[in-house]
Structures are given as C-alpha cells and as structure tokens.
Image (tube, grey):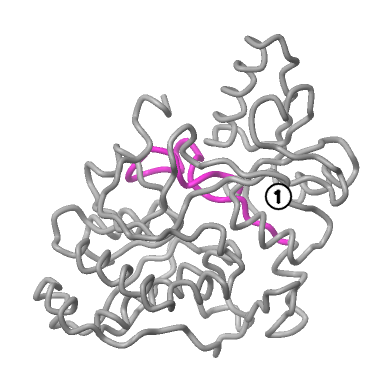
Amino acid sequence: MSRNANRSRHAPLIAVPVVLGLFALTACSDPAGAAAGSPKAKVGNVTYDLSATQSHITSKKNDAIAAELPADVGNSGVLVIGSGGAGGGIPPLAFTAEDNKTPIGVEIDVADLIASILGLKPKAETTSFENLFLGLDSGRFNVGISNIGVSELRKQKYDFATYRLGLHAFEAKKGSGLKVSGAADIAGKTVAVASGTLQEAILLRWNQENIKAGRAPAELKYYQLSTDYYLALQSGRVQLYLGPNPVAAYHVATAKQTEIVGTVSSSFPITGLVGVATKKGNGLVKPLSDALNVAIKDGSYAKVLAKWGLQSEAVTKSEVNPPGLSNATTK
C-alpha cells in the first residue's frame, strides 16, 4: 500500500491532486483481509458482500428525469462512471471484488442506482483519483464518483450533485473510554494523522484553540501506512487516529479491535458534503441530483448506505453545487 492511500479527498486541488498527496483516503489492508475468507461476511449488523456477482440496489426509471439528460448521454444509453479505486481500492467506498477485477462498493452502488433512475446502463471504469478528473475534463467519463468533497475551487471546473455527508472519524482502541466532540477532548492526547491532510488541518486548528484556552496541545504522530496507524493504536503509542469515516467504520466492523469515539465534518468548520462530479455546464448535474432525490424519497438510497454500514453519512436532500470548503480554509 502506498503512502498516498492515507490522504483525504476533500482538499481543494482540481486536476492533479496527488502533487500534494491530499486526496487518497485512508485505505486499509486489514478490512479486506478480514472479510476475504468468504464472498459474504457478517459483521455486526452489516453483511459485506465481496462477490463479483452481488446484486445492486436499483429503482425504476423516471421518464421525466431521463428526459432532462443531454441528448448525447440519453441517446448513448450508457452512464460512464469514473471511479478512483485503482490499486485494489478503498473499502467500503470503491474496491475490487473477490474476483480481483470487478469494482464494488458504496460509490459503485450509488452510481448504479442513479443510472437505473435515468434509464441508463452503468459502465464503471476504475482509474486513479487524479486521472478521474482528467477523464472528466476530456469527456471520457460522464461522472466521477470517488468520495469527492465539494469545494469552491472544484466548483470552478465541475458541477456537483451531493449524496453523502463528508465525515472524519476518531478511532481509538476498543474500550478506551475516550470521547471526542471538540478541541478540549484531544488536549494532551497523542493523535495519529496523515501529514498534509484536512484531518491534520483540523487538529492543528484545535491545538491552537487549546493553547489559547491554556490547555495542553495534542501531540501529533505521523506514519507511512494504514497498518502503521492501527499498530500504533494497539500498542498504545497513540491514543487516537483521525481518518475518513467510511474507512474507519469498515475497519472497526471488520478488524474488531478499535471503535469510533467521535466524528468531525471533513470541511470543518462548515458542513462537508460529498458529491457526484461532472464537467461544469454539460447539463448532467440537474438530472443527477433529481435522480438522487427520487432515490432518497423511495428508500433505495437508504438501502445502499445500509448495505455498507454508512447510515451516519445520509443526507435528506441532494443539492446542486452547495457552498463548499473555501479556498481560504485550505491555504
């Protein structure tokens, strides 16, 4: 696993995010391995289906929304989806099934659901995160779905239809008794985080707040790989690890060694939102958002999130280009 697997995808760059290493989420070799003994693994209240032939949650075609599609997309009959899950991917977002080639995950299921409502056949193409944006620019992909956080800078080139909250999660060793809801809760603690991420930026701001309040700052620890972070938690070298919530939830469920003790918005101090991205002005964003709102209303959207244990990231409405992380926040 590469070091870039520990980066948040809610940073502001547009076309070449890996330059600063801020985009890839915290991948984890442990979760995939923990469930890999069978195509299906029952973990708590969630059954993770890792099979290539798994069923996908769909809804019936909505003719009125399908009529909103740009002619070229509607006539093609296909929704070409860019998924940034290259290199095996990041469970439970987008990763490779047990056949080592079929893309699966919550992002794939959301895209399939949207396509069904639009009356289109989904065609997911796996690529790296930076090439996903290049594919949108060139028209290779109609949409990109890869835990892409809405930011003001990204909105200059892309349109967004939101479908999930963007959350980061604090993981601690099971039974730690820790709870994190704000800066005071990390005062004096040892916290693992990936360098250059929005998670780190949140912790640095919280440390400033703690110092101003006369509290001890948290000691931040940096490691190369996801496995290093979890080993540090288990050995007691760190007390907390701040990373993306979907990956943390999957790791907690599959490894059964840690627990989530708090969450924070990925775009703190504003509400972070994740959106389906499409090239700005191409006419796709409204039908995408309308399709998502149909799915929210008919319950199929909730079923997709429940399938992957991500109910905590549900939104009540898909929005088109809502306020996102400001440029100033990330400089």
In the displayed image of the protein, which residue is found farthest to the left? 71
Q: Is residue 113 above or below residue 266?
A: below
Q: Is residue 55 within the magenta segment?
A: no
Against 152, residue 328 (above or below) is above
- x 47%, y 32%: residue: 269
Label 1 Cα neighbours within 10 Å, binned few <14 / some 14-19 / many ≥20: many
Read off the residue under disc 1: 226
Image quarter hosting the N terminus: bottom right
Q: Residue at x 66, y 11 (%)?
A: 213
Residue nearest the observer in this picture, 200 or 189: 189
State yes or no: residue 17 in magenta: yes
What amino acid is found at the position of numbered circle 1 in the picture? Ser
What's the residue at 55%, 44% (across, down)? 7
The location of residue 268, given as percent across then percent down, is 49, 35
Corner quadrant of residue 61: bottom left
Counting the numbered discs, the total is 1
Percent position of residue 292, x then y: 33, 69
For label 1, the SS is helix
Residue 147 located left or right of residue 286: right
Label the magenta part by its dominant secondary structure: loop
- Provide residue 72's location: percent of width, then percent of height: 11, 75
From this view, report whether residue 126 is shown above or below residue 260.
below
Q: Residue at x 30, y 41 (%)?
A: 323
Is residue 81 toward the left or the right of residue 155 in the image?
right
Residue 21 coordinates in the image, percent (x, y): 51, 40
From which residue to which does the magenta span run?
Answer: 6-29
Q: Nearer the viewer, residue 250 or 176?
A: 176
